[in-house]
């Protein structure tokens, strides 16, 4: 399975936090699964840290690498796909993650129920 971590799942997975569900933790740890961390989440984290709304690792890229997660950049096609998404959600970061997941056939690891309104597989 190819997994794309939502921002909260990424933070909880890199810090081994108990907030991460048992099922998500097992899927992330399963060696056959590919686990992807999007720069979308890094961007969201950086903004929230700079506003004082979130604490995060000082070197997120190193934390992602130490967990063995694959980094994923944003493609123009990801941004363009947002035009065709229904407006179930106003969060631009989540909408971009949905676009990436749809384009690449990824399952989003998230506890946010709004993702289920899109035609994208989720796991929690």
Image: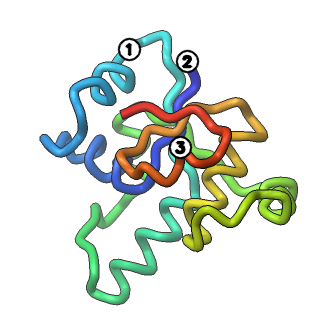
Residue drawn 38% across the image and 21% down it: 27
Q: Are marks 2 and 1 in contact (CB under 8 Å)?
A: yes
As drawn, is 122 to the left or to the right of 77? left
Q: Percent position (x, y) of residue 106?
A: 63, 32
Indicate which label's residue lies in the foreground, 3 or 2: 3
Alpha carbon separation for disc pair 2 and 1: 9 Å
Sequence-first tag of 3 and 2: 2
Q: Residues within 10 Å of mark 1 (few under 14, many from 20)?
A: few
Q: Which mark is residue 116?
A: 3
Quarter of the rendering containing residue 74: bottom right
Quarter of the rendering containing residue 57: bottom left
Residue drawn 31% across the image and 53% down it: 11
Sequence-first tag of 2 and 1: 2
Residue drawn 58% across the image and 48% down it: 117
Residue 92, relative to residue 18: is it above or below? below
Give the labeled residue for mark 1: 30
Q: How is the image coloured?
A: rainbow
Indicate which label's residue lies in the foreground, 2 or 1: 2
């Amino acid at each position: 399975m190819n997994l794309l971590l939502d921002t909260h799942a990424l933070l909880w997975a890199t810090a081994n936090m108990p907030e991460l569900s048992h099922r998500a933790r097992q899927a992330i740890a399963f060696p056959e699964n590919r686990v992807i961390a999007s720069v979308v989440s890094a961007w969201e984290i950086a903004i929230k840290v700079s506003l004082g709304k979130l604490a995060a690792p000082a070197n997120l890229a190193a934390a992602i690498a130490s967990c063995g997660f694959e980094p994923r950049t944003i493609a123009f096609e990801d941004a363009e796909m947002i035009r065709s998404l229904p407006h179930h959600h106003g969060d631009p970061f989540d909408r971009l993650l949905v676009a990436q997941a749809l384009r690449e056939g990824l399952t989003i690891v998230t506890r946010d129920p709004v993702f289920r309104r899109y035609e994208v597989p989720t796991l929690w």
